[in-house]
Image: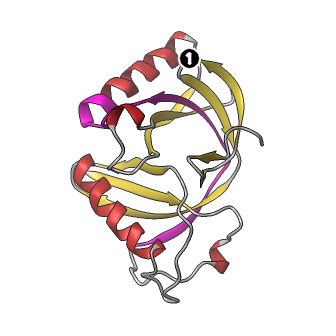
């Protein structure tokens, strides 16, 4: 896999770039490990709560009181009616067996299987309106090309909340079939 392997010095999952057009790409990701938690509520509330739970874990709120390197992106996926899964990518050199056990029983370790995704990058605040608009635009782009859309949308956030809107990197993605 070659693709971008870091953002502002933070590790991110590697991928092969299959196609690129302006801010839209088709990427092939290999498997990678995440820590995830599923939260109830609207999207904004769920990402805030899920982020706090996972941040507590990586900043030492675990069975070994050990810090884990920060990575990007923070991911958010729909998990049902008013349910959202929030994910932190784990460093590539780790396997679930090498990570300290979470103190919070809501945290799960999951290996995300290889995937092919259509991804659109955008800056600004990731409001519900902005995310919905970007997802609709990407879904339209996928349909125009006759690509086999499978799942999503997924939301990827790369920057701290303190980052100025025009310097922020956000992405919306849909899983694609092999088509």
**Farthest residue toward the bottom?**
64
x and y percent of residue 18 in the render? 71, 26
Residue 22 figure quarter = top right
Location of residue 3 with respect to 82 vertically, above or below = above
x and y percent of residue 171 in the render? 46, 35
Location of residue 17 with respect to 52 vertically, above or below = above
**Element marked by disc 1:** loop
Residue occupying the point 38% across, 80% down: 104
Residue 139 figure quarter = top left
Give the residue at mark 1.
Answer: 22
Q: Nearer the viewer, residue 85 or 100?
A: 100
Residue occupying the point 39% across, 51% down: 160
Residue occupying the point 31% across, 54% down: 47
Q: Is residue 15 left or right of residue 127?
A: right
Q: Nearer the viewer, residue 79 or 55?
A: 55
**Farthest residue toward the top?**
144
Quarter of the image that includes the C terminus: top right
- Dot 1 alpha-carbon crowd within 10 angstroms: few under 14, some 14 to 19, many 20 or more: few
Magenta part of the protein: which range? 107-131
Residue occupying the point 61% across, 50% down: 12
x and y percent of residue 73 in the render? 50, 49
x and y percent of residue 2 in the render? 76, 40
């Amino acid at each position: 896999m070659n693709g971008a392997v870091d953002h502002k010095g933070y590790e991110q999952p590697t991928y092969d770039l299959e196609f690129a057009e302006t801010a839209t790409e088709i990427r092939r990701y290999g498997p990678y490990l995440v820590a995830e938690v599923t939260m109830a509520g609207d999207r904004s509330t769920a990402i805030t709560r899920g982020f706090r739970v996972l941040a507590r874990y990586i900043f030492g709120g675990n069975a070994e009181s050990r810090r884990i390197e920060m990575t990007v992106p923070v991911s958010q996926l729909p998990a049902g009616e008013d349910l959202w899964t929030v994910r932190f990518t784990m460093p590539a050199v780790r396997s679930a067996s090498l990570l300290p056990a979470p103190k919070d029983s809501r945290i799960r370790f999951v290996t995300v299987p290889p995937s092919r995704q259509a991804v659109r990058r955008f800056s600004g605040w990731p409001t519900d309106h902005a995310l919905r608009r970007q997802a609709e635009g990407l879904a339209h782009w996928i349909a125009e090309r006759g690509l086999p859309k499978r799942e999503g949308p997924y939301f990827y956030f790369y920057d701290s909340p303190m980052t100025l809107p025009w310097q922020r990197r956000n992405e919306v993605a849909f899983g694609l079939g092999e088509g």
